[in-house]
Amino acid sequence: MKDSKYLTIDEVLNKGSGNVHLRGWVYRERKSNKFVFIVLRDESNIIQCVVSKEKNPELFEEAKKLTIESSIKVSGELKKDERAPTGYEISPVSDLEIIQIAEPFPITAEQSPELLYDNRHLWLRSRKLNAVLKVRHTVVGAIHEFFRSRGYYEFDAPIFQPIQSEGGSTLFEVKYFDDKVYLSQSWQLYAESAVFSLGKIYNMGPTFRAEKSKTSRHLAEFWMAEMEAAWMKLDEVTEVAKDEIRFIIQEVLKHNRKELEILKRDSNLLEYYVKEEYPTIKYTEALDILNNEYQMHVPWGKDLRTIEEAKISEFFKVPVVVTHYPTKIMGFYKPPSNDNPEEALCFDMLAPEGGLEIIGGSERSLLVDDMIKRLEADGEDPLRYAWYFDLRRYGSVPHSGYGLGVERVIQWICGLENIKDAIPFPRTMIRKTP
Ligand code: 4AD
Ligand code: MG
């Protein structure tokens, strides 16, 4: 049963006046000869609480013992005070119950990022991560709502997979009894079998890539939100992707104004991304822009690097879909276009403000011989994909899908420098604890 006496700080701030009861943790404390100023923190917000020596000498002595992150219950009078961090304070505190005096907290104001990652289990309490985790909650909820409200079924694929989909170099190999398997790089190949049953499907789940590069945008374990739909072609699937991104941003604007402010993220920009159209261009047009506008001479056939993606996004200033990348640098399942087999029917979506690739997708190849050749060129044994090729033998139809990097979207929406702050406990090549 809810202990009804206690309100959260936000509930108290909404109430605006009266005698209130709160519980939480000491976020900051400052002692003077006459007062102890406590900034109390709970899941919802922070509020200043003032213990006066003159008004309550016994409580004042108690409050002097408090350390950062000590857990307490506080009662007192809520008053407006412009100088207080959230515009109100509890003054005077009329009751204070100490639940635990915290040991000296290992995190102080000025700290190296690595120490914050070492203490991630404690740093989750920071205002920054509290805000990011709330945005993450909204993003994940929005993705489910987006697909469910459009008639997509949620479908689950195995995490242990005997084959690869995104290239052998990033596979995590796992001992599997007397054999070996890989951790899922993507839900896609299994999803392709399910669209012949369910039509339109989606999923969000943990995804693993042994990324050997240390960048601010790659995790070894991340969450991918994927969709797959029978009968869908490239021009349609890119529009679904645009709608999904727009919907996610709308939901964040609806639910997370306060968090965006804490993160110092300009919500006007996000509003702009909701209103504007997102262009679709071909890879070849992207090269033209790079050559003509930025004098970057990227030869046709090379994948776009981070710096080039950044320029494309700088040029458009909204999310942009780039299609028709060179077939030879794309995965085996991305089909050559009929008009020009050098170009694949695939796309990436690049986010503005840095050109982060937030989505990758494609039509799926229906050409078994071509896929076999490309797998062999990659050193794969096509026999292991026999079940996948079956899908092209029993009522094959065009189908398409894409995967959205959940942490990449959070990184972009929150304006985070490093993707590690978009997930509670990041995993990278050099970080696997706590
Ligand atoms: O572009 P990717 O590799 O596409 C696929 O895996 C397809 N099978 C998806 C599909 O069509 N169903 O990955 C999709 C997205 C990327 O655009 C990126 O946003 C994210 O997943 N991503 C990563 N995010 C964080 N860390 C990594 N190491 C990531 N690798 C990919
Ligand atoms: Mg990609």
Image (cartoon, rainbow, N blue to C red):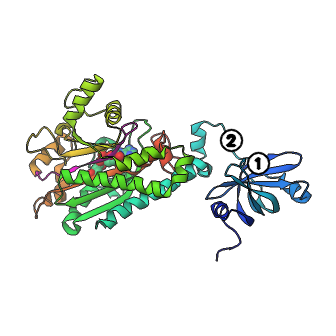
- Residue 108, labelled with which disc? 2
| Residue type indicated by callout 1 | Glu
Q: Position of residue 257 (x, y in %)?
A: 52, 53
As drawn, is 20 to the left or to the right of 171? right
> In the structure shown, which secondary structural element does the residue marked by tag 1 occupy?
strand
Q: Which residue is mark 1?
A: 29
Cβ of mark 1 under 8 A from ligand 1: no
As drawn, is 12 to the left or to the right of 304? right
Asked if the residue at tag 2 contacts the one at tag 1, i.e. Cβ–Cβ closer than 8 Å, the answer is: no
> In the structure shown, which secondary structural element does the residue marked by tag 2 occupy?
loop
Q: Residue at x 85, y 56 (%)?
A: 62
Q: Position of residue 347 (x, y in %)?
A: 24, 45
| Residue type indicated by callout 2 | Thr
Q: Position of residue 176 (x, y in %)?
A: 36, 57
Separation (CA) of disc 1 from disc 2: 13 Å
Q: Residue at x 19, y 29 (%)?
A: 300
The stretch in magenta equals 351-367
- Residue 413, labelled with which disc? none
In which quarter of the view is residue 401 placed? bottom left
**Camera-side residue: 110 or 282?**
282
Split into quadrants, the picture shows ligand 2 in the one at top left
Count of numbered circles in the view: 2
